Amino acid sequence: MSEPRISSQDKSLVAARAGHCCEYCRSQAKYSPDSFSIEHIVPRARGGTDRLDNLALACQGCNNRKYTDIEGIDPVTGEYVPLFHPREHVWHEHFVWNEDFTLVIGLTPSGRATIEKLQLNREGVVNLRRALFAIGVHPPK
């Protein structure tokens, strides 16, 4: 028997709640060359559910790098810490943009670990941020 799928209505709700931006790297779906998907914050393999409070909109780059992980290593302390949780954490409390809005900087152990694990400042995303900032559509609201 196959796994139940997330309904298209729930997918639409998750995307709208996220402002059509990746809830990790803040890439905007309408400008991204990669597809976006609904990801399980706590993966089903680790007991996560399909409930809306466990679903997030993620670009393919972040989703692939997160995989089934829920924690990562804080590069400052070297300790394992929980990754950023879009339903329990506030993005601006864990991350900030640098001066030209191209790099995400971690403010907390979870923020720093998430940046490292998901590679939020990977080259393609940084280049896209730079171009979008130049035409006035980055950072997203």
Image (cartoon, rainbow, N blue to C red):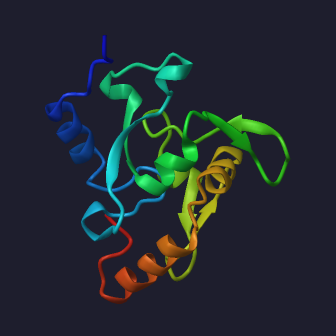
Residue located farthest toward the front when viewing the structure as drawn: 1
Q: x, y percentage for residue 15?
A: 25, 46
**How many numbered tags mark residues here?**
0
Q: x, y percentage for residue 90?
A: 47, 45
The residue that appears at 21% across and 46% down in the rendered structure is 16
The residue that appears at 57% across and 68% down in the rendered structure is 122
Residue located farthest toward the top when viewing the structure as drawn: 1
The residue that appears at 45% across and 40% down in the rendered structure is 86
Tell me if 81 is positioned left or right of 126 in this view. right
Q: In the image, is residue 82 above or below residue 58? A: above
Q: x, y percentage for residue 101?
A: 49, 76
Q: In the image, is residue 16 above or below residue 44? A: below
Q: In the image, is residue 19 above or below residue 9? A: below
Residue toward you, 30 or 78: 30
Residue located farthest toward the bottom when viewing the structure as drawn: 134
Residue toward you, 122 or 74: 122
In which quadrant is the N terminus drawn?
Answer: top left
In which quadrant is the C terminus drawn?
Answer: bottom left
The quadrant holding residue 115 is: bottom right
Residue toward you, 64 or 80: 64
